[in-house]
Amino acid sequence: MARAIRLEKRRRHRLFRRALRLAAGLATSGMAAVMAACGIMAASPAPVPLQRPALGSIIGYLKDGRPIRMIAGGSGPALVQSKYGDTTSSLTTLDITLSSDTTAGNCLIVAIKTSATTTSPTVSGIKLGGSAGNFAQSATEGNVSTDEYSDWIWADPDCAGDETAVVITCTGGSGSGVIAAWVMEWSGLVTSSVTDRSQGGVDDTATGTFSSGATATTQQASEVAVGMVGCSTTTTPSVSGWTNLTYEEGLLVSYQVLTSEQTVTYSGSFSADSVYTALVVTFYAAASGPASPYYPPGRPAQQRPAALPQPGFARSGKGAPWTAPPVTPSPYWQRKTPLRITSYQQPGYARHPASGAPWTYVPPTPSPFWQRKTALSQVTYLRPGRA
């Protein structure tokens, strides 16, 4: 009896000290300290209110603190406008004025044919509104010294807005000749590194057909293909499966909106035999659909059983993963919080083959010692895979 009284006093003393520590936490750190002590995660930061969030900007947070960002979207690639121009009086400069102002963020694609009696001009640069912007050569085909025609395709992704003046500059041309070009403004293309695949073909012997040859397989399904051919026929070459711009000054430019990864060939036929230089280039389209929040995927979770481990189902070696098939709950279902129980586990109720080894509950047969008159506090947790 004396021993039981001493144990009860110790238990009450421990509870009293625990209450004092809890009170001290409330006084020093407030509710946050209590939540941390209990393993409760604080609420995630509130989303940042933005009327027009920029692409890539953070608009909120997940519960684990990871940011939610805006990702690019759109309605798919579309031709906004196109304008043709040519000159036979100069082998150095060609000015083209667009019909409408450009839209910032769109992409200008310029297809140029050069030809001269001695040496065809080499395209050296293009400016929009007096600035080179992001213009760069995507591909070229044809030798300016030996081939009848030279083809050039340049692109200006993420172009400047509210501009109409396009100036094409060439060098090295000699003799009499022509510079002809189509300028296209496209929406729905990526804003950097826009060029994907290209391929060109030349035939300086008059023939009734033309072909650029096949590109390598495009690296994504949604792209825009632009094909061009420089030739000498007076009638429009016949091309199937492409949308043609107006045939002008021996220059035909066509385009396709691709919807699958594929090789692309720009080919067709002439009404009369002609020499030619053909070129095709594909350009990456941006992700379709409206700009929307991007929720990062969940982090890899630690291995957890589908249900709490039941008697006879948890098996593992030391440090090895364990599994627990779902079973019907039993009177001995494990809990994460301490429980107040009113009965002891009698000898033969739980068997422990070795320290750290799997355990098994064996339901006992009721006996005179099954139930106690006083309640006990369970102060230890049942761990998966061990007693």
Image (cartoon, rainbow, N blue to C red):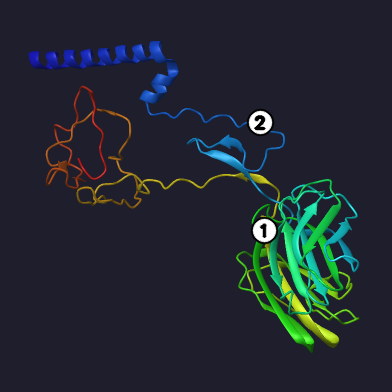
Q: Is residue 93 above or below residue 161?
A: below
Q: Is residue 56 left or right of residue 189?
A: left
How many C-alpha atoms fall within 10 Å of the one at disc 2: few (<14), some, or many (≥20)? few
Looking at the image, which is closer to me, 47 or 243? Answer: 243
Quadrant of the snapshot with the C terminus? top left
**Image position, residue 224 (x, y; %):** 72, 64
* Amino acid on which disc 2 is placed: Pro
On screen, residue 61 above or below 236: above
Regarding mark 1 in the picture, which secondary structure is present there? loop
**Residue labelled with disc 2:** 49
Q: Residues within 10 Å of mark 1 (few under 14, many from 20)?
A: many
Kindly indicate the quadrant of the structure image that contains residue 379: top left
Residue for point 35% across, 48% down: 303
Identify the disc placed on residue 194: 1
In depth, the one of 178 and 353 nearer the eye is 178
Is residue 1 visible to the viewer in this orientation of the structure? no
Q: Amino acid at mark 1?
A: Val
**Residue 11 higher or lower than 134, as above or below:** above
Q: Secondary structure at mark 2?
A: loop
The extreme left residue here reads 2
Nearest the viewer among 86 and 306 is: 86
